[in-house]
Amino acid sequence: MDALRIEGGARLEGRVKISGSKNAVLPILCATLLAPGNYRFDNVPLLRDVTTLCSLLRTLGVRSSREGETLLIDSTAAVPNEAHYDLVRTMRASVYVLGPLLARFGHARVSLPGGCAWGPRPIDLHLKAMEALGATIRLDHGTIDAAGAPLHGGEIDFPISSVGATGNAVMAAVLAEGETVIRNAAREPEINAVCDFLTDMGAKIKGIGESELTIEGVSELHPADHVVIPDRIEAGTYLVAGAITGGDLHLQGIEESHLTATIEAIQRTGSQIETEGEGIRIRAGSEISPVRFETRPYPGFATDMQAQLMTLLLLARGTSEIVETIFPDRFKHVPELARMGGDIRVEGNRAVVEGVSSLTGAPVMASDLRASAALVLAGLVAGGTTEVTRVYHIDRGYERIEEKLAGLGARIWRVTQA
């Protein structure tokens, strides 16, 4: 099993290219099930989750091949086979095949998904959306069995904003008969990217980027090529890396408008962030100031950046407060950060962080994707050696993280444990 070994204390400097968005490319690849033919996707990150999804799509008759950052997809021979547990269990995003299979073939069998180990993330909103479009849903020993041919337009009112459920609902609705209205739709850039791709395929979607989407179903779609948007969470993670190490970094290949809440939060801690050339530059401040923040649906502060910013606040001069409103139990990284000297008190969905003068390297274990990034960030600044195990989590969402960090001056290596 691989681990990341880090010798802390190096100041990071230089340029880093941000990869394509994991959370955008996964539903977009599933959307190729909606129309047979050949697709070309550029700026596709080389990630464990992308590889897993391509394996899942292969079981559904979809072929894929990679040429560098380009992924070629052929969905000509797609069939509504069952999406089995052995693949679906490793990645919650696998449930994205539900909407496209149901819309195109009128039937879908998808195992209940797995993924990160933290907290419940029920898919009942996905299922209720399918039912609103006329599908009949049955749970059969851990497998979703959905039928509905043809789907028809309906009204979907989400009680909470859900990125996954919004994406699935949109992909199902584009081939449904009549008009579908989705209220309290997620507004995240990744959902907008899915909608833009579907529009290029011939879908009729109004309100992209707003909380209410109106979709006029069409009888068929056609293949389209697509360039994947930059990964705003990877970008935010490297901004924290620059801030926590007292560094000076230039992030390239980013979409600054997607990072507004992250940039504002990091600036409040004392770092300077400004547009420079075709990217943004972060120059760390002389000290880290404490802040209070809450995670919120986009355009608020992303829950996927909570663990990383918490790591920065470990070294703030004073007390910080974090309120997690999206997934209230998303604090599995706290005990591991405490092993490195962090002073954090968790009270329900609230974490109080008392700044300390330094962190100490230690063997730590990743519990999920973003927690693993937080532990790597802590290792960059901790005294001595940090070894992060279970890095298969980080490989799900960060492309070549050790190579990118090493290129900025970090002392970090991937090692194989016995």
Image (tube, grey):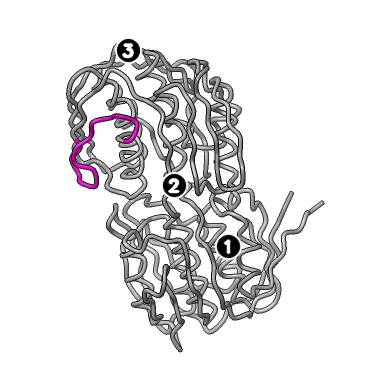
Q: Pointer 3: residues within 10 angstroms few (<14), some, or many (20+)?
A: some
Q: What residue type is disc 3 on?
A: Gly
Nearer to us: label 3 or label 2: 2
Magenta region: 200-213
Placement of 406 over or under 63, stated as above or below: below
Q: Please identify the residue farthest to the bottom as the structure is shown.
A: 286
* Image position, residue 37 (x, y; %): 47, 24
- Say left or right for 393 vs 317: right
* Image position, residue 414 (x, y; %): 72, 59
Which circle's residue, 2 or 1, is located before the other in the chain? Answer: 2
- Picture quarter containing residue 48? top right
Which circle's residue, 3 or 1, is located before the other in the chain? Answer: 3
Question: What's the mark number on residue 228?
Answer: 2
Nearer to us: label 2 or label 1: 2
**Where does label 3 land, which residue?**
148
Q: What residue type is disc 1 on?
A: Glu
Residue for point 38% across, 60% down: 255
